[in-house]
Image (cartoon, grey):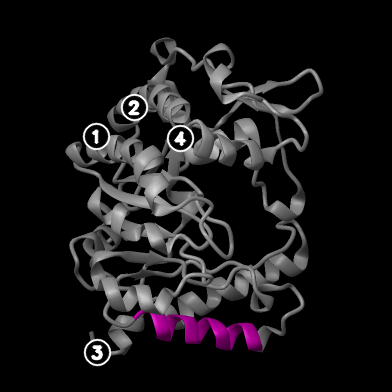
Amino acid sequence: MYKLTEKENLLRMFDGEIPEYLPSYDFFGWGAGLPFQTGEKSADGYPIDEFGIEYTTTDVSMGGMMPVPGRIFLEDITKWRDVVKVPDTSSWDWEKLAKDALKDKDIEHNPIVLHNGGYFMTLMNMMGFAEGLCAMEEEPEEVYELFDYLSGYYLEREKALLKYFHGDIYELADDTAAHNCPFISPETYRKLVLPFHKREADMARDAGLKIAMHDCGKSECFIDDWLDIGVQLWEPAQTTNDILGVKKKYGRKLIITGGWDNQGPISYPETPDEELREALIKYIDDMAPDGGFCYMAVVVGNYTDEPFIRKMKLVHDVYEEYGRDWYKNHGY
């Protein structure tokens, strides 16, 4: 049996060491925090978040929530003070929130990854991408003031998360990139978003937590900025980025979590099982050498359909049968 728990094994990588066994990153199982839905619904029956933005989902989005098309929460960035109101967290029963969030988690053996809010994506959710991106270009001072206001709220939440949720890793999250290119330039990111990511990272690091970043799309241009604020793990690290180049450049300084083509034909339900199996083995062989990697492969589809369930079992089986003991079997 292994000497290290899942938590110890993963945290070992943050110290720049080779793990005892290849970690399989359990995004949902290890994640903890507050759901952005309040449990309340709009007059039209849509779930709303703490600001009042309406959301919807579909089966094929695997539970992912997006703003209801055509419903714009904030039309004019210069009027945000009249529209955006953050909740008062002082009356929240944080002990109960933590107890409910952690009741099914093995916090002794598994890491707890804390999730909080975002800035870029919150603005896009409020205004839509067209108006949100225009606001960042045309009214950067107003955007900065809005983010500063949101930051006060997120930092209050973070204090409570750090106190009550027994976290090991604090994961920032802002999808600042599309599939083929970033939505904003590194300069805009440094000016309007990075200062607020840094505030959260500083607080978490001071509390002894490791720092991770969730950023989909072609976001590799932001890596150096993330490293500057203490980020050591990046997920999902989609293959629209030069993943092998990133691994070569940063080595164990950056734990690539993902790096699997979760959007291409290899992840389609109709892909033959043997083809998927071979691709998964190559994925491990490419990414595992010299550490700095967590297995996180998924296929696309409706998560309630039998083909999706069967394919995800195959993904899990390849990890258990081939990936988990990769380091031991390759002389590390």
The residue nearer to you, when weighing 185 against 97, is 185
Spatial distance from mark 1 to mark 2, Cα to Cα?
Answer: 8 Å
* Observer able to see residue 150: yes
Name the kind of residue labelled 3 in the image.
Answer: Gly
Q: Main secondary structure of the magenta part?
A: helix
Q: Quadrant of the N terminus?
A: bottom left
Image disc number at residue 331: 3
Name the kind of residue labelled 2 in the image.
Answer: Leu
Q: Which residue is mark 1?
A: 203
Spatial distance from mark 4 to mark 2, Cα to Cα?
Answer: 9 Å
Closer to the chain start, of discs 1 and 3, is 1
- Outermost front residue: 138
Tell me the element at label 3.
Answer: loop
Q: Is residue 2 left or right of residue 98?
A: left
Q: Which quarter of the picture shows residue 180?
A: bottom right
The residue nearer to you, when weighing 296 against 105, is 296
